[in-house]
Image (cartoon, rainbow, N blue to C red):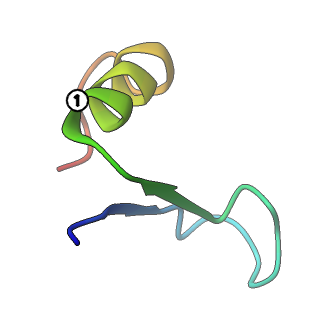
Amino acid sequence: MTVFVYVNTSKQVGDAEQIKVFATTDAAEKWFEENDPGRRSL
């Protein structure tokens, strides 16, 4: 199984917004389009 992980280093450990785990490329892409439109993240 492959997952895609986004880590927000500006958040504290344990913060619900610190880590996002996506099961599919489509789910990750949709989240990035809505939350990182400038594509600052890889």
Q: Is residue 6 above or below residue 30?
A: below
> Residue placed at 23% from the left, 29% from the top?
39
Placement of the N terminus among the 4 image quadrants: bottom left
Tell me the amino acid under the disc marked 1. Arg
Res 29 quadrant in image:
top left
The residue located at (26%, 27%) in the rendering is 26
- How many marks the image carries: the answer is 1
20 w.r.t. 11: above or below = above
Residue lying farthest to the right in this orientation: 15
In this view, 1 is above or below 14:
above
Residue in view at x 33 percent, y 37 percent: 28
Element marked by disc 1 = loop
12 left or right, relative to 7: right
Is 34 left or right of 17, judged from the image as shown? left
- Give the camera-side residue of 37 and 24: 24
Residue at horizontal 21 percent and vertical 38 percent from the top: 25
Q: Quadrant of residue 33?
A: top left
Q: Is residue 18 left or right of residue 37?
A: right
Residue 6: x %, y % from top left: 41, 59
- Residue that protrudes farthest toward the front in the picture: 1
Pointer 1: residues within 10 angstroms few (<14), some, or many (20+)? few
Percent of width and height locating residue 24: 28, 43
Q: Where is residue 36 shown, x and y percent of the image?
A: 39, 27
Residue 27 locus on image (x, y percent): 37, 31
Read off the residue under disc 1: 39
Is the residue 14 above or below the residue 33 in the image?
below
